[in-house]
Image (cartoon, rainbow, N blue to C red):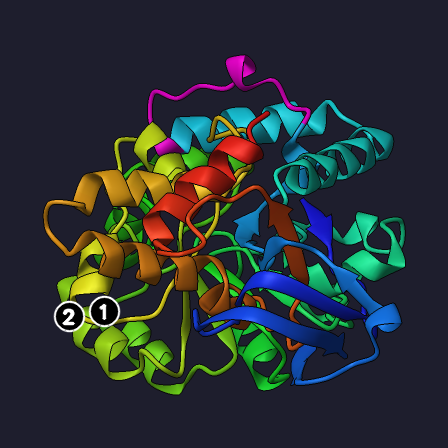
Amino acid sequence: MNLIEQNRYYKTDIFIDINGNIYKNKIFKIENGHVKFFEKVEKKEIIELNSIVFPSFVNAHTHLELTNINKSDLNFSSFVDWVISLIKEKRKKDEKFFLNSYLKGKNLLNNYGIYAFGNILSPFLYDKIPENDKEFNFVEIIEYNKNNIENINLNYPKVSPHSFFSVHPDLIEKILKLNKPISIHFFESKEEYEYLIHNRGDIPEKLYSFTNLKPLKYNLDYFLNFLKKVQNVQLVHLCNLPEDLKPLIIKRKNELHFTLCPRSNKKFGLKSPYYFFIKNNIPFSLGTDSLCSNDDLNVVNEAKFIFEDLKDEFDKEQLAKILFLCLTKWGYKSIFLNTIIYVYISNFTSYNNFYFYDFLEYHSIMNKN
């Protein structure tokens, strides 16, 4: 996989734009992340590719700093047990460990041909990662103690109040008022649903006991109000979304951003709601989550996972086209990235009759580590 350079003329066999439109034998140039086509350009200025050019796929939700944590040291008995074991492992590591993990994870993404991503990043790493990476990172905010809210630094372009069970609601309100892009885990697990809707279960009984926190009382109305007013938000997972919230998700499907991580969810016995999203024509992006809950960071495998599950429910080409948009157009939107990164790949054989499902398979094979 190779990157297309800005402000240079190229000619290629197939060009796929951010909307999934297919163009053949086009001369083009990328300026400020946007494509321009040309009828004639001096031949000496043109780079002949004989390839397929398309937007780099987007891994819209991951935690790269966890790349080097050994998954075998984690407890997968339940979601809360896993969270507690992850906290324990993280407490053993130092800043250098997490920075090296981040850099290794980013390298893995690039090896898969993925150059755009939405990463959840600890604040202490923000000034240490490469400057060009910062637009891909949501700085993670975790603070459940109301007395500490005033001490939290929110001076980042994008932030991630981790979840409603790890960030005090007053702090979430404060973040929302800043009107900056945010990413938040939203009804990921059964335990999260039990706590946020019914104020019971393993989160107050086990997780808060471990972290010495006191449960707060949420209710369904709180989340109905949240979904009605929130802007510039990426909601992640949604595996255990209350039924009463689904009409609002449908109503605001073009205003909110949703990211699903089906293979990671499966590790905890959770079902990602991609069928609900596709059936209701709701745009969504795809993420892998971290290597602490997935086998790799290749987001194309999330698309293939969905394709294999639903190929008998929908027209195959239509489904593959939707998944292409999940990996591109809707991915860029969900991480609030305005410029598109284009890449090219050679030797794709379906030039005369292009099929998105063939292309997804080919991309996966060509970028398999």
Residue 92 lies, in percent from the top left, at 73, 22
Residue 69 lies, in percent from the top left, at 64, 23
Q: Which residue is mark 1?
A: 220
Tags 2 and 1 in contact by the CB under 8 Å rule? yes
- Quarter of the picture containing the N terminus is top right
Q: Which residue is mark 2?
A: 244
Helix or strand or loop: what does disc 2 sit on? Answer: helix
* 236 horizontally vs 275: left or right: right
Give the residue type at disc 2.
Answer: Asp
SS assignment for the magenta stretch, majority: loop
Image height check: is 145 above or below 291? below
* 196 horizontally vs 147: left or right: left
**Residue 77 magenta-highlighted:** yes
Question: Which one is closest to the eye, mark 2 or mark 1?
Answer: 2
Span highlighted in magenta in the image: 68-79
- Foreground residue, 126 or 255? 255
Residue 337 lies, in percent from the top left, at 63, 72
* 107 horizontally vs 336: left or right: right
> What residue appears at the point 30 percent right and 57 percent down from the top-left corner?
196
- Foreground residue, 4 or 346? 346
Helix or strand or loop: what does disc 1 sit on? Answer: helix
User: Which quadrant of the structure image shows residue 311?
Assistant: top left
Q: Is residue 289 visible?
A: yes
**Residue 214 magenta-highlighted:** no
